[in-house]
Image: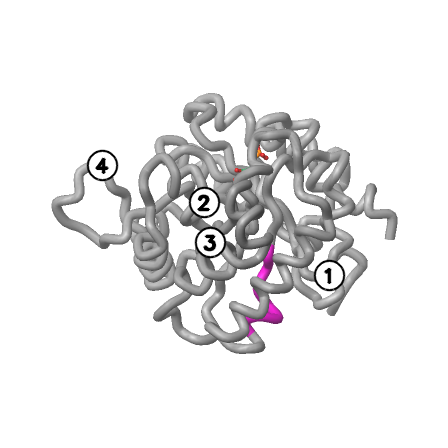
């Protein structure tokens, strides 16, 4: 049943905090505890919005233990995953290991991985396949640089990246897509809600072609890039935007909690 908080298509919004390289496991425990209190104090209905945190790998076991022991209504996942299941891959973490830690999601193909770690579309595709095989929901990140935007317009690069990421993924698979224009990440200059909607609609069409119409209707498409409590409402009003992937603002409990409670600002 669509409720006030689900999107018009009945998808449950997802607000995801990508901590990047911040907070060690002790800091993570304190942070997650405080975040849960803050959301509980605000009487957030966790059935109407999914809240997920993405700590560094070394925090995951602590976060899992806390969430499980205190029965916190929060989800969590990793920021990256290996394309390999096991073997001589020093430093890598397998999707199966993340699943064993109760991770729900894994971020794949973040622009910082693509740029700083040379992740190609082929690598992103292999990691997506590995995640789906281990029943993790991949959050597939796509987005154009400022130069791409000038040369190709807003949709062409994200569409090509998502098409490549979904190659060989079974029809009906559960994925999340994050549209994160590279020029908007950490810049303080978010895309406009209309820009985000235009690309999100194009990305939903890619999911329909790759995974089928039902999967496309069910897939959450997030916007990421300088999301704040002051601009979240504009994104959430768009029919094809189903949540946000938040970087810097996810490290501030008050601010992240306010983004999660976007409904207050959307004013529906
Ligand atoms: P900012 O919210 O800091 O712009 O980062 C966005 C991001 O990269 C989330 O994955």
Could you tell which of marks 1 and 3 lies nearer the N-terminus? Answer: 3
Q: Which residue is mark 1?
A: 239
Q: Residues within 10 Å of mark 3 (few under 14, many from 20)?
A: many
Q: Which mark is residue 140?
A: 3
Gap between marks 2 and 1, in whole Å?
Answer: 26 Å
Q: Circle 1: is it few (<14), some (14-19), or many (20+) Cα within 10 Å?
A: few
Along the line of sight, which residue is nearer the eye, 234 or 27? Answer: 234
- The reply to whether the residue tagged 2 has its Cβ within 8 angstroms of ligand 1 is no
Image marks 2 and 1: residues in contact by CB distance under 8 Å: no
In the rendered image, the residue lying farthest to the right is 267
Q: Which mark is residue 77?
A: 2
The magenta segment is 215-221
Observer able to see residue 93: yes
Distance between mark 4 and mark 1 Cα atoms: 40 Å
Q: Secondary structure at mark 2?
A: strand
Of pointers 4 and 2, the one earlier in the residue sequence: 2
Residue tagged 4: 91
Which residue is pictured at 68% across the width and 51% down the height? 195
Question: Quick one: label 4, few (<14), some, or many (20+) residues within 10 Å?
Answer: few
Instruction: Name the image quarter holding residue 248.
Output: top right
Query: Nearer the observer, disc 3 or disc 4?
Result: 3
């Amino acid at each position: 049943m669509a409720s006030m908080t689900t999107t018009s298509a009945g998808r449950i919004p997802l607000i995801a905090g990508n901590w990047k390289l911040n907070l060690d496991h002790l800091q993570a425990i304190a942070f997650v505890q405080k975040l849960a209190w803050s959301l509980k104090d605000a009487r957030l209905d966790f059935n109407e919005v999914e809240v997920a945190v993405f700590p560094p790998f070394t925090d995951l076991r602590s976060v899992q233990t806390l969430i499980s022991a205190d029965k916190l209504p929060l989800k969590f996942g990793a920021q990256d995953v290996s394309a390999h299941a096991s073997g001589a891959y020093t430093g890598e973490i397998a999707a199966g290991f993340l699943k064993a830690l109760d991770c729900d999601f894994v971020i794949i193909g973040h622009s910082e991985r693509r740029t700083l770690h040379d992740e190609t579309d082929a690598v992103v595709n292999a990691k997506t396949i590995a995640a789906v095989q281990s029943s993790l929901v991949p959050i597939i990140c796509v987005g154009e640089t400022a130069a791409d935007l000038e040369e190709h317009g807003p949709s062409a690069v994200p569409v090509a990246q998502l098409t490549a990421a979904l190659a060989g993924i079974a029809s009906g698979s559960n994925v999340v897509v994050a549209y994160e224009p590279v020029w908007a990440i950490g810049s303080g200059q978010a895309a406009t809600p209309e820009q985000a909607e235009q690309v999100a609609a194009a990305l939903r069409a890619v999911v329909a072609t790759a995974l089928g119409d039902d999967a496309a209707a069910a897939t959450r498409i997030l916007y990421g890039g300088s999301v704040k409590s002051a601009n979240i409402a504009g994104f959430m009003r768009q029919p094809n935007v189903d949540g946000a992937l938040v970087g810097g603002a996810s490290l501030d409990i008050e601010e992240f909690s306010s983004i999660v409670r976007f409904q207050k600002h959307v004013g529906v």
